[in-house]
Amino acid sequence: MRHFSRRGRACTGFALLLAVGAAQAQTYPNKPVRLVVPWPTGGANDILGRELAEHMGRALGQQVVVDNRGGANGMIGAEAVARAAPDGYTVMFHNLTAHATNPAIYRKLSYDTVNDFAPVTQVASNPLIIVTHPSLPARDLRELIALARAQPGKLSYASFGNGSMAHLGGEMFKSMARINMLHVPYKGGGPALVDTLAGHVPVYFSGVATVVQHVQAGRLRGLAMTGSSRLKVLPDVPTVAEASDLKGYEASVTYGVWVPAKTPPEIIAKLNSVIVREIKTPEFRARLEKEGASEPIGNTPAEMQATLKAEMDKYAKVVKTAGIEPQ
């Protein structure tokens, strides 16, 4: 009887926890939600984060306040979220690719990339675009690869920072194409674009939105998209896989939403439902297209976690092969 009593109390306690969790989900949110964007204002992360916050606020019936915590390739903001209360009132909109690659580049993180966060959903994926100055005698990607093979180590390519997606994408391209190009890191996309337009650096792995008008005007030549599909804003620019023999190449910046670990699953489910519905609205799709992004993703937490782990494995190999270190 004592055993039965203990078992009965345990079942009652579990049922009570379920009831509390369900009640939390029904009343959540009853105050403003903080959306941490671990990047400075003005960039693609911030622009899409603010668009998401506006949509979430309308759907949840509470203000969603954007809190920019830029610095250290997203690690400052991520740490703040990892240490926040797991109550659904601190949410992170982060570059999944940077989140996945930081453990490989920075050996000592102040948080666990996988275990200190609970995934909600992936929002969208932004491919890069490989552009060249028109003076470079390579009119397509195959010609660029041939030129680089003929002049090993002489061609250079620009990125918007050491360890950035542009750097990782460039190094993966070099490895798969079996070529040697010199990496020239810049402190942001603006300076890299200026030097590419001036012809000081012949190749640039760029974000799409910043170079669309220059490609359309012929000031830069768009050779290939690094994602899995073409974009509506530049429909004539093929993917790397289409433009070369590099099957399986893909290097995109993916955005996702997380909450602190141990956030009640009922709250995660509610956030997932709201965000997936909102990012697939025509209004949000239009914003994605304007920022050079692909279609919205809107997957399950489990699918997002699997993507994160796959990206961590993928880019850890790139970092190791290229010898990328923090600067």
Image: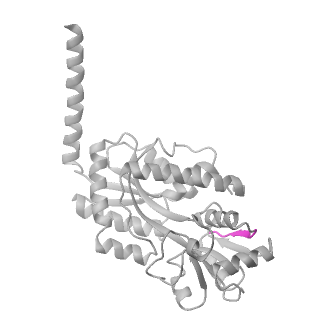
The percent position of residue 81, horizontal first and vertical second, equals: 43, 48
Would residue 185 be counted in the magenta stretch? yes
In the image, what residue occupies the spot 58% across and 50% down? 313
Compare residues 67 and 14 and report the one nearer the observer: 14
In the image, what residue occupies the spot 80% across and 72% down? 152
The percent position of residue 191, horizontal first and vertical second, equals: 63, 76
Q: To which quarter of the image does residue 4 belong?
A: top left
In the image, what residue occupies the spot 62% across and 51% down? 316
Q: Does residue 283 lie above or below 267 as drawn?
A: below
Q: Is residue 75 visible?
A: no
Compare residues 322 and 223 and report the one nearer the observer: 223
**Left or right of residue 266: residue 138:** right
Instruction: Give the residues in magenta.
Output: 180-187
Residue positioned most to the bottom: 217
Q: Does residue 226 lie above or below 107 as drawn?
A: below
In the image, what residue occupies the spot 71% across and 79% down? 201
The percent position of residue 159, horizontal first and vertical second, equals: 64, 70
Would residue 45 be counted in the magenta stretch? no
